[in-house]
Amino acid sequence: MKIDNLFEGIFLERPNRFTVIFESVGINKKAHLRDPGRLKELLLPEAKLLLRPALNPANRKTKYDVIAVESEGIWVLINSGFHSDLAAELIKSKIVPELSSYSVERREYTFGKSRIDFLLTPDTSVKEGSENESNILASKMLLEVKGCTLVEEGHGKFPDAPTIRGKRHLEELIKAKKEGMNSAVLFLIPREDAQIFSPNWEMDEEFSKTLEQAETDKVLIIAHSFSVNFHETSLILTPLKKVKVKIKP
């Protein structure tokens, strides 16, 4: 994925969940922050930001969007608006074994009381007798996508703030699995320093317990990291590697 038309700014403060004050060429400005997480380990005073002019400024209170932040020498994507497209590219690439036999049928699929990010369908483009033929599963799959930006000493953790909505999504995936449908949750780690992933038990025990139950009920739990590089005015995110998942604390 390539995100263009970016410029650098300096983080000053976050007056509320969705607003950031930044400085650029000596002028203080406001920007919209799409990620509702706490991000307290990332949004430190004078941290470098990557921002982009709003695509629809006439309908906005802020004229800019926060895209990424620099942390300990690496760029971290903190705009959740790109997660769906990033996941779609990952699915299309066929590099994640658990998803390699699927294609996207629909985004924002309603199941139960929630909208799940993707409905996947077995990939009929796989030719008869090919290596992947035996891996095609009989049923469709629900796939929920979460963005993990918190990494401490190589340990990725989700969430960085309590999430009732995230817990509900997991409950729907468990329900789907029990009803005979395949289901999975994909944790995107848009930074390159994660070596292992686990739920953040200290931050949200209820979500973590539900993820543990999801694993018990055979919901697929996948984590994948990305390299994130800034060149001139573009941010380039490239799939890096699957990250080992460890559920229990």
Image: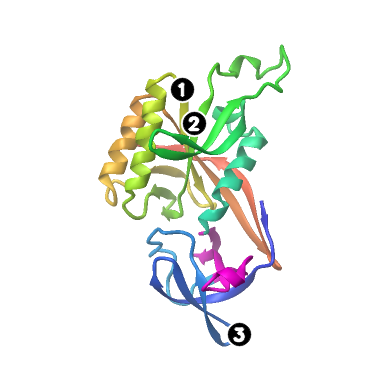
**Residue 134 visible within the image:** yes
Say if the magenta span includes residue 220.
no
Q: Is residue 46 above or below residue 193?
A: below
Asked whether, in this view, residue 43 is left or right of residue 131, the answer is: left
Q: Is residue 237 above or below residue 13?
A: above
Q: Are marks 2 and 1 in contact (CB under 8 Å)?
A: yes
The Cα atoms of the two marked residues, 2 and 3, are separated by 46 Å
Q: How far from the left and from the top, in percent, is residue 165?
A: 36, 46
Q: How far from the left and from the top, in percent, is residue 221?
A: 44, 34
Sequence-first disc among 2 and 3: 3
Q: In the rendered image, which residue does mark 2 sit on?
A: 142
The Cα atoms of the two marked residues, 1 and 3, are separated by 53 Å
**Residue 249 visible within the image:** no
Question: Label 3 crowding class (10 Å Cα cut-off): few <14, some 14-19, many 20+?
Answer: few
Looking at the rendered structure, the kind of residue marked 3 is Val
Q: In the rendered image, which residue does mark 3 sit on?
A: 25
Looking at the rendered structure, the kind of residue marked 1 is Met
Question: Label 2 crowding class (10 Å Cα cut-off): few <14, some 14-19, many 20+?
Answer: many
Q: Give the SS element for disc 2.
A: strand
Please give the range of residues in magenta: 49-78
For image coordinates 34% across by 55% down, the residue present is 161
Question: Label 1 crowding class (10 Å Cα cut-off): few <14, some 14-19, many 20+?
Answer: some
Q: In the rendered image, which residue does mark 1 sit on?
A: 181
